[in-house]
Image (cartoon, rainbow, N blue to C red):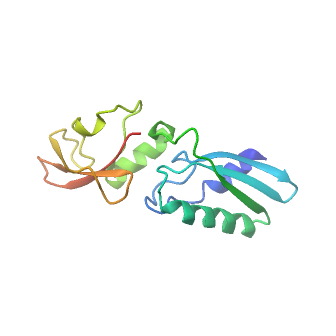
Amino acid sequence: MEENLFELLSQIPDPEIPVINIVELGIVREAKMISENEAEIVITPTYSACPAMFNIEEDIIKLFKENGILAKVTTKISPIWTTDWITDEAREKLRAYGITPPEKGSQEDHLNIPKKCPRCGSENTKQISRFGSTLCKASYQCNDCLEPFDYFKCH
């Protein structure tokens, strides 16, 4: 049954990055039935102040209600979410969408390492800002094709 819950949860896209779902993003920590028509879903925010978590919780409750299940959503902040929890499939989806995914095995100084441009593949890139379109991204620009792109920060 838990597998079915994760399949259901994989229908919910991340509100800020709609090409990946909340399961692929790695924020769904646990999903279990606690009674015949009630489920408990445990999620962890990518950042403690992530504004999308409210939308995600609402989306979970709505989807489960549509499927005849009462969803209890619990937010768990320990251990903290890490970009290592993003699936390989989601990393490829991010790249195709124009966001450079984080490398596995987060590094403390990851923002100062050249990022591969998701459009042309060049590593001749520069950081424009440590803060991108959302809290979890930094802004970069490719020096070869001149296109700006987001980088999903490691943590």
Q: Position of residue 148 (x, y in %)?
A: 21, 55
Identify the residue shown where x is 38% and y is 55%: 135
Please name the residue shown 46% across and 60% down the image. 18
Q: Residue 46 at x, y = what percent?
A: 48, 49
Q: Nearer the viewer, residue 80 or 32?
A: 80
Residue 101 percent location from the top left of the image: 36, 43
Q: How many marks?
A: 0
Q: Is residue 123 above or below residue 53?
A: above
Q: Is residue 50 above or below residue 152?
A: below
Q: Which quadrant of the view contains residue 37?
A: bottom right
Residue furthest to the right: 36
Location of residue 60 with respect to 23 vertically, above or below? below
* Residue placed most toward the observer, 139 or 68: 139
Residue 105 vs 152, above or below: the answer is above
73 with respect to 52 (left or right): right
For this view, does 29 lie left or right of residue 1? left
> What residue is at 11 percent from the left and 47 percent from the top?
143
Say which quadrant the C terminus sits in.
Answer: top left
| Residue 74 located left or right of residue 150 | right
- Percent x, y for residue 68? 80, 66
